[in-house]
Image (cartoon, rainbow, N blue to C red):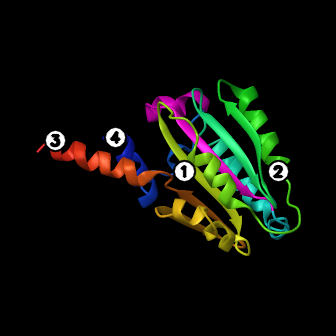
Amino acid sequence: MGVKIALFVLSLAGFLTPAAAQGTQGGQVEALRGFPLRVNLIVDGSGAFAEVAPAAKAWLFQNIVDGVLAAGDRITIWSAGETAALVLEQSISGAGDLEAVRQAILELPSGGGGADFSSALEQAASEPPFDGVTHTLLVSSTASFSFAFAGVGASLLRISRVEEFPGWRALVVGLNVESRVREAARDLQLHF
């Protein structure tokens, strides 16, 4: 468990990023990593996201689909529009699965109204345990970003890292981290 916490903290600090895997192919990414990855991707479905969606989706293709996902990984995608909607749950075993992920991202809606990030964050936080490392990535227009911090979801965003882009943001969220940090601290005390 301590290794998982360290990797998560490194990713939040910017030392382990999707760009670290660029230049590799599919299965090589997982082999370099040495562990499977689950990505919970929550994408703004509000009207405010429509203008920046092409740039954000291109970034997701390059940095997540082509740069990080590999055989053995799993991705779950939610659209956070007026209500949160589960779009795709996909285990990655080959190129066809990566294409299904690309298609799901490409077809993500950008409608009117607000963005229900809270429901999507709650669903992501309640995902069953995974034998690997889980990262939750929230992609939002700058205008909708405040919705991520509204309601119950605010308590889920205590530990995060934000990447700023023109008109949108990518936020790596530390879901359920408090209990894992306490467990890692307890493990560390046992070694000293």
Q: Is residue 87 above or below residue 9?
A: above
How far apart marks 4 and 1 lie (CA) works out to: 20 Å
How far apart marks 1 and 3 lie (CA) works out to: 35 Å
Q: Which amino acid, by three-letter code, is at mark 3?
A: Leu
Image coords of residue 141 (percent x, y):
73, 69
Q: Residue 108: which numbered mark, if any? A: 2
Single out the mark in the foreground, 4 or 3. Answer: 3
79 left or right of 93 in image? right
Q: Quadrant of the C terminus?
A: top left
Say few, some or many: other residues with alpha carbon within 10 Å of mark 4 (under 14 / 14 to 19 / 20 or more).
Answer: few
Which of marks 1 and 2 precedes in the sequence? 1
Q: Which amino acid, by three-letter code, is at mark 4?
A: Val
Say few, some or many: other residues with alpha carbon within 10 Å of mark 1 (under 14 / 14 to 19 / 20 or more).
Answer: few
Contact check, label 4 and label 1, Cβ < 8 Å: no
How far apart marks 2 and 4 lie (CA) works out to: 34 Å
Q: Residue furthest top?
A: 93
Single out the mark in the foreground, 4 or 1. Answer: 4
| Residue placed under numbered mark 1 in the picture | 19
Q: Name the one closer to the observer, 24 or 4.
A: 4
Contact check, label 2 and label 1, Cβ < 8 Å: no
Q: Is residue 146 above or below residue 4?
A: below
How far apart marks 2 and 3 lie (CA) works out to: 46 Å
SS at circle 1: helix
- Residue at image location 58% in from the left, 40% down from the top: 127
Magenta stretch, residue numbers: 26-45
| Residue placed under numbered mark 4 in the picture | 3
Image coords of residue 109 (percent x, y):
86, 54
